[in-house]
Image: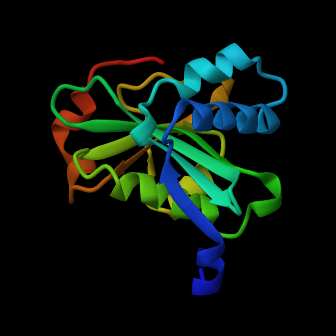
Amino acid sequence: MDKTFEKEFNVASVKSPSEFKCLLDYLELIYPNQDRSSLRANASMASYDQTYLLKKNNEIVGSIWVIKLPFTDFNVGGIGGVTIMEKYRARGLGKLLVEHAIQSNPNFDAFLLWTRVPEFFKAIGFHPFEEGIEREINDSTPMLYSNIQGLLDRPTVTKWPRIKF
């Protein structure tokens, strides 16, 4: 992404209840068929400082959040709410958001998410991960990213508890 383009956008964590309300308004645009209480429940899983907004001229054009997942052997962050407004897609902004979330959370050994666009996440270093994880609804694919060399090859990874969200 060239520097001029990067300067048009900024990524920052949610700072206030009013900014969180703006996030909900944005999510209603992205997911018009979901009710607000469902969107609020999903967006409220993460704390404000782990909910990141991509903005252009003070308008939200993307979002992502990170939560701690209940694994015992590793510190695993769950990534959710990865969205980019349609008119800004295919410009590298999704990658920018995911990389920002990962770099802003160095305490996690790995990150797990469910997606219906696994090709996008494979291109930025995630791997399909089925062992010990049940498929979520909507036929999405579990994907795992690790900051630790060889973590995906460790035998204990396959012994992670079965979880379902």
Q: Position of residue 14 (x, y in %)?
A: 51, 42
The residue lying at 54 percent from left, 54 percent from top is 121
Does 157 sit above or below residue 54? Answer: above
Towards the viewer: 151 or 20 = 20
Horizontal relation, residue 21 to residue 44: left or right: right
In the image, what residue occupies the spot 34% across and 38% down? 77
The residue located at (44%, 51%) in the rendering is 127
Q: Point out residue 55 in the picture as x, y percentages from the top left corner.
A: 64, 57
Q: Is 45 positioned to the left or the right of 86 in the image?
A: left
**Where residue 49 sits: x, y (%)?**
40, 41
The image quarter containing residue 100 is: bottom left
Q: How is the image coloured?
A: rainbow
User: Looking at the image, is 1 positioned above or below residue 120?
Assistant: below
| Count of residue discs | 0
Q: Position of residue 138 (x, y in %)?
A: 68, 25
**Is residue 63 in view from this perspective?**
yes
Residue 137 seen in the current view: no
